[in-house]
Amino acid sequence: MIVEKVKISDVKTNPKNPRIIKDDKFRKLVKSIQEFPQMLELRPIVVDENNIVLGGNMRLKACKEVGLKEVFIVRANDLTDEQKDEFIVKDNVGFGEWDWDILANEWDAELLNDWGLYVPEMATEVDYSILDGEDLDQELSNMTGGVKKAIQIEFEAEHYEQASELVKFWRDQSAYVGGMIMEYLKAEKEKL
């Protein structure tokens, strides 16, 4: 793999790239480039033979925002159009998952947030020892019969108001919001 340094004006964004970073996350990307520009050489922008970005559209946009005159690239020559499309998608798909225990115990949450990874506050541990020895099975069974369960869903700050209004609207219509979300998630899973 040959990393080249080229004029930023020679690199063209890919209008076909379906992945975007907006608002606060984009500002964090710009900040990360300002604070750690060496990462651009370690993770260069991938372009095709026409200097059109296959991987790094948002990094290129952030580099322009910062005012850089040159960027590091790697050329992916000899790819078919289908392979280029596949690269664009696969480069933006997150296959892994975060180990939240390691992040909570080994990493600084404030730094992670500054670097663009939002770490939700972990619930504090609950001491259930006061229940030891108690026979609560029947009591708990009675309490949970017919009771709806809740799942917490997180939204970025800029989406919270809209999400809250949508949930309120559908509740006012007597809709089963949980069922609606489940149906949507099932349909999305089937697409994978």
Image (cartoon, rainbow, N blue to C red):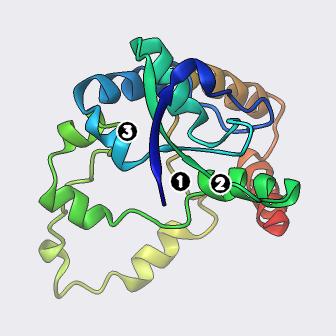
The answer to whether any part of residue 157 appears in the image is no
Dot in front, 3 or 2: 2
- Tell which tag, 2 or 1, sits nearer the viewer: 2
Which mark's residue is nearer the viewer, 1 or 3? 3
* Label at residue 137: none
Q: Which residue is mark 2?
A: 76
Give the residue type at disc 2. Answer: Ala
Tag 3 residue: 40
Residue toward you, 37 or 182:
37
Point out the tag, 2 or 1, that comes first from the N-terminus.
Answer: 2
Task: Indicate left or right for 113 with 44 as reference.
Answer: left
The residue singled out by tag 1 in the image is 151
- Looking at the rendered structure, the kind of residue marked 1 is Ile
Q: Looking at this view, is 25 or 43 the one in front? A: 43
Quadrant placement of the C terminus = bottom right
Horizontal side of residue 57 vs 97, given as left or right? right
